[in-house]
Amino acid sequence: MNSLHHCLNRPITPATNLCRPSGKHVRVRACANVGVHAPGSLKVGVSKEVMEAEGRIMVGTYARAPVVLSSGKGCKLYDPEDREYLDLSSGIAVNALGHGDPDWLRALTQQANTLTHVSNVYYSIPQVELAKRLVACSFADRVFFSNSGTEANEAAIKFARKFQRFSHPDEKQPATQFISFTNSFHGRTMGAVALTSKEHYRSPFEPVMPGVTFLEYGNIQAATELIQCGNTAAVFVEPIQGEGGIYSATKEFLYSLRRACDDFGSLLVFDEVQCGLGRTGYLWAHDAYGVVPDIMTLAKPLAGGLPIGAVLVTERVATAISFGDHGSTFAGGPLVCNAALAVLDKILRPGFLASVSKKGLYFKELLIKKLGGDSHVREVRGIGLIIGVELDVSASPLVNACRNSGLLILTAGKGNVLRLVPPLIITEQELEHAAEILFKCLPALDKGNLN
C-alpha cells in the first residue's frame, strides 16, 4: 500500500489537549508522507483515491473536472497515472510561463533559501524592486500588493471611496456609488462580488455591498449619463472580459468612460486581473486602446503560479491613502515578489509580446478555419492568447471530450463559450495540436446536447 493511500484511508484519532472554543476535543492526525512521491512513481488508482477523499473532507465549493494533476512541464500536465494533457487553461490564465520554467524556479528557490516572509511591518527588497518595475512599465506612480485578484479589487473599492472623501472634505456625502457592466466578473469577496454582474454569484450572500449599478457593456450613452449625475466614486471595467465570455471593449467606449470620469470627478478602474501582463500581446490590455485608468488591478499571471495581486494607482489617488487605511499580512512577501520579478523579466524580453500577438493571430485563424464551418460555432473572438469560441449550445460536452483526448480547456460566458488561455510560451505546433483535438471532438456537441 503506498503512503498516499495509507494517509487518505487511515482512521482519524484524537490528539492530546487540542480543544475548540466549546471545549470539545478536535480529532486530528498528521501524515508526514503526503507529497513525497517523485513524478511518475504513483500507482494506478491514486487519482480515484484522491477524488474520493476530496469528496469526504473538502467543502463542496468546486465542481471539479474529474482529473488529478500531479506534475507539469512547459505546456504539458500529467496525472498520477502518467496521462498527458496539453494545457490551454493555464490555471485559469495564471501560468503565463507554463509549468516549471527554469528562470522562475531559480528565482523561487534562491529566494526561499534567503527569506520567505517578514510581513509588511518591515521593508523587504523584492517587494520594493517589483513595485519599481511595475511603476516603470505602466501609467502608475505607486503600487499596493494583495494576495489575489478579488483582494486587489477590494482595495480599489476602498481607495476609490477614500479618494472621494479626501477630495471633498467639506461635503457631507461625497460620491460613493460604483458602475460596473454586464458580463463582468471582479471576484468573490463581498465587495468584488457586488461588482460582478451575474446574479447567481451575488444572491446567496445578500445583502452585498450596496451602491452598484450595472450597465450594458459598451453602452456609451448610458454610462456617460450616469457618471454625469455626479455620485459615482469609480467605474470598474475589464478592457477584455474573461469570465464573462471574452468580450473586448471598443476604443470609443473606454475613451468615453475616461472623458466622463475626468469631467465629473469619478475614478476609472481597469480590472486587468485576467487580461493584463502580456495575455493580449500587449503588456497591459489597455495599451491597445491608448486609454489609461486611474487605478488598475492585477493578479493571475503576475507571479507565475504563486498568489499575488496588485493595485496600481496614480499619485493623485495615492495621496488620499494614509497609514492604516488598508493592509495585508502576506501580501507582497519576498518569495512571491521575487517570482514575479522573474515573470516580468521574461515577458519584457525583446520579442516576447510580439510572439504572443503572432501566435494568437495564428491560432485564431486556425480555429476559424477548422471550427468555423460547424453549425454550432457562432464566433471566434479575442486578441492575443485570450480567445473565445462562442457556441449555440452548452460547451461542456466538448470540454469533456477534449479532456478525454488530452486537451484541457475552460468555459466562459453562460457556459456556451470555450475559453482558450494557454501559457504564453506555447508553440505554434502545440496550438495546431490543440486545434486538431477541438476539431475531432466537435461531434460531442451533438451527442452531449441532445434533449
Image: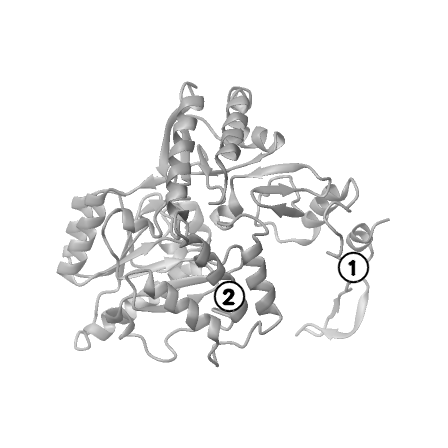
Q: Position of residue 328 (x, y in %)?
A: 47, 72
Q: Nearer the viewer, residue 91 or 264?
A: 91
Tell which circle, 1 or 2, labels the residue nearer the N-terminal end: 1
Residue sitting at 48 percent across and 63 percent down? 147
Which residue is identified by label 2? Answer: 338
Numbered circle sitting on residue 356: none
Which residue is identified by label 1? Answer: 33
Indicate the amino acid at tag 1. Answer: Asn
Q: Is residue 87 above or below residue 101?
A: above
Q: Nearer the viewer, residue 161 or 401?
A: 401
Residue sitting at 82 percent across and 57 percent down? 11
Q: Which of the 4 quarters of the picture holds residue 416?
A: top left
Q: Position of residue 251 (x, y in %)?
A: 22, 44
Q: Is residue 362 at all visible to an observer of this figure?
A: yes
Quick check: marks 1 and 2 in contact, CB under 8 Å?
no
Q: Position of residue 132 (x, y in %)?
A: 37, 69
User: Distance from label 1 to label 2 (Cα)?
Assistant: 29 Å
The residue at the far right in this view is 1
Indicate the amino acid at tag 2. Answer: Asn
Q: Is residue 359 above or below residue 303?
A: above
Residue sitting at 20 percent across and 73 percent down? 167
Q: Is residue 144 at all visible to an observer of this figure?
A: no
